[in-house]
Image (tube, grey):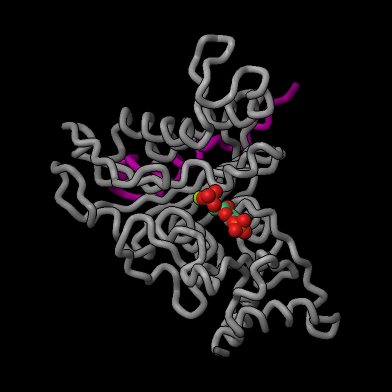
């Protein structure tokens, strides 16, 4: 069997990128490799999720005598473990933890990066075999290198991100990450256990036909959102329609599909939850960064997501993200109150 040597692995790709950057230290490449390693471990467990009832429920001991953990806690532990033991991350913040964690050892304190993540987004879908994902982003710390990281390292506006990405555990497992230089997607080749470059230089189509929203909340949305959704439903061939409604309820899968095919994903505020559900720091900012680098847009309805100044690790924001022209059309409706 001939081996296609034109296909790059994640490591080969990041090393190749380093060659173009004078004075690069390789620290970000190592950080991405660490995240890729944790994701491979999570992937193995996600693939076994259907066997939990056979092997033991979360909180019990399985037939191998190991404690069975909830998958989102397992994913959180794996990410923390690889990043703490690596040499490229000074601290983390996670959806699973109330506070940030400063690794605070001699090596970690010398790192210039902090990482924020949602270890397993959409985890309510695990039991029904629907795609779920890991979301992450990386910032350069603002506190001095050599000291433990502090809250201000994590409360940076999204436009300061150095890199952001996600892993989708779906029909195949993919790792997609963005730096300012572009967005690239890697598919896990299970035969060699390597991330291989399958989607180079991803661009979000300027427009599309998919809109993603939780219709169940329709009567709790503001007038602008309601009118936009109604307009999506009324479109005909003469104005680019009809649009198709697609909503998995797993943001990584929904935004991934729209990024590749063109479309718009929305999680608006509601009358009972004006800030919506999604978290700014480790859910919205990473996707806003990725989609902007790919040529799309992301707002909270009126303001650019990446310009919002965070005030708390777990704050929520309404979220609208997707193809540029569709986002611009949405913006005209958001002026309606
Ligand atoms: P989670 O972080 O608790 O998993 O929730 C986030 C998920 C997103 O992936 C998805 O877009 C959204 O919740 C769906 O919420 P809803 O069921 O309210 O539409
Ligand atoms: Mg989440």
Residue 137 as seen in the image, left or right of residue 234: left
Q: In which quarter of the image is residue 7?
A: top right
Task: Identify the residue at image location x=33%, y=53%.
Answer: 139
Does 318 sit above or below residue 130? below
Q: Position of residue 130 (x, y in %)?
A: 69, 43
Task: Identify the residue at image location x=54%, y=46%.
Answer: 121
Does the magenta portion include 14?
yes
Residue 234 as seen in the image, left or right of residue 272: right
Q: Residue pushed farthest top?
A: 64
In the image shown, does 202 or 333 lie closer to the viewer?
333
Residue 219 as seen in the image, left or right of residue 241: left
Q: What stretch is highlighted in magenta?
A: 1-28
Does 217 sit above or below residue 19? below
Image region (quadrant) for ligand 1:
bottom right
Q: Position of residue 34 (x, y in %)?
A: 42, 34
Q: In which quarter of the image is residue 240?
A: bottom right
Q: Where is residue 326 in the image (x, y as percent from the top left)?
A: 65, 76
Which quarter of the image is occupied by the N terminus? Answer: top right
Task: Identify the residue at image location x=84%, y=85%.
Answer: 238
Q: For residue 148, say whether it is visible.
A: yes
Q: Residue pushed farthest front?
A: 272
Does the magenta portion include 314?
no
Q: Residue pushed farthest bottom?
A: 336
Does 227 sit above or below residue 259? below
Q: Position of residue 183 (x, y in %)?
A: 53, 54
Total of numbered circles in the picture?
A: 0
Q: For residue 19, say whether it is visible.
A: no
Which quarter of the image is occupied by the C terminus? Answer: bottom right
Task: Identify the residue at image location x=56%, y=84%.
Answer: 334
């Amino acid at each position: 069997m001939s081996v296609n040597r034109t296909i790059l692995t994640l490591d080969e790709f990041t090393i190749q990128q380093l060659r173009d950057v004078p004075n690069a230290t390789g620290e970000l490449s190592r950080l991405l490799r660490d995240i890729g390693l944790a994701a491979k471990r999570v992937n193995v467990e996600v693939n076994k999720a259907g066997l939990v009832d056979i092997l033991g429920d979360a909180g019990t001991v399985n037939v191998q005598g190991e404690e069975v953990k909830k998958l989102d806690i397992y994913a959180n532990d794996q990410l923390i473990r690889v990043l703490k033991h690596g040499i490229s991350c000074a601290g983390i913040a996670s959806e699973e933890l109330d506070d940030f964690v400063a690794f605070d050892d001699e090596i970690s304190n010398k790192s210039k990066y902090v990482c924020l993540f949602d270890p397993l987004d959409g985890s309510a879908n695990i039991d029904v075999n629907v795609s779920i994902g890991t979301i992450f982003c990386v910032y350069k710390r603002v506190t001095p290198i050599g000291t433990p990281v502090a809250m201000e390292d994590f409360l940076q506006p999204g436009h300061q991100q150095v890199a952001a990405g996600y892993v989708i555990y779906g029909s195949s497992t993919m790792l997609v990450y963005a730096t300012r230089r572009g967005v690239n997607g890697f598919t896990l080749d299970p035969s060699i256990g390597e991330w291989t470059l399958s989607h180079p230089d991803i661009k979000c189509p300027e427009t599309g036909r998919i809109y993603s929203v939780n219709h169940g909340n329709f009567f709790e949305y503001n007038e602008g959102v309601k009118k936009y959704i109604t307009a999506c439903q009324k479109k005909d061939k003469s104005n680019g329609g009809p649009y198709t409604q697609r909503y998995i309820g797993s943001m990584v899968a929904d935004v991934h599909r729209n990024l590749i095919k063109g479309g718009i994903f929305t999680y608006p505020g509601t009358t009972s939850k004006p800030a919506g559900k999604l978290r700014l720091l480790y859910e919205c900012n990473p996707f806003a960064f990725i989609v902007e680098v790919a040529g799309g847009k992301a707002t909270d309805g009126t303001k650019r997501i990446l310009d919002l100044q965070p005030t708390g690790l777990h704050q929520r924001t309404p979220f609208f993200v997707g193809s540029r022209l569709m986002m611009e059309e949405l913006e005209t409706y958001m002026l309606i109150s």
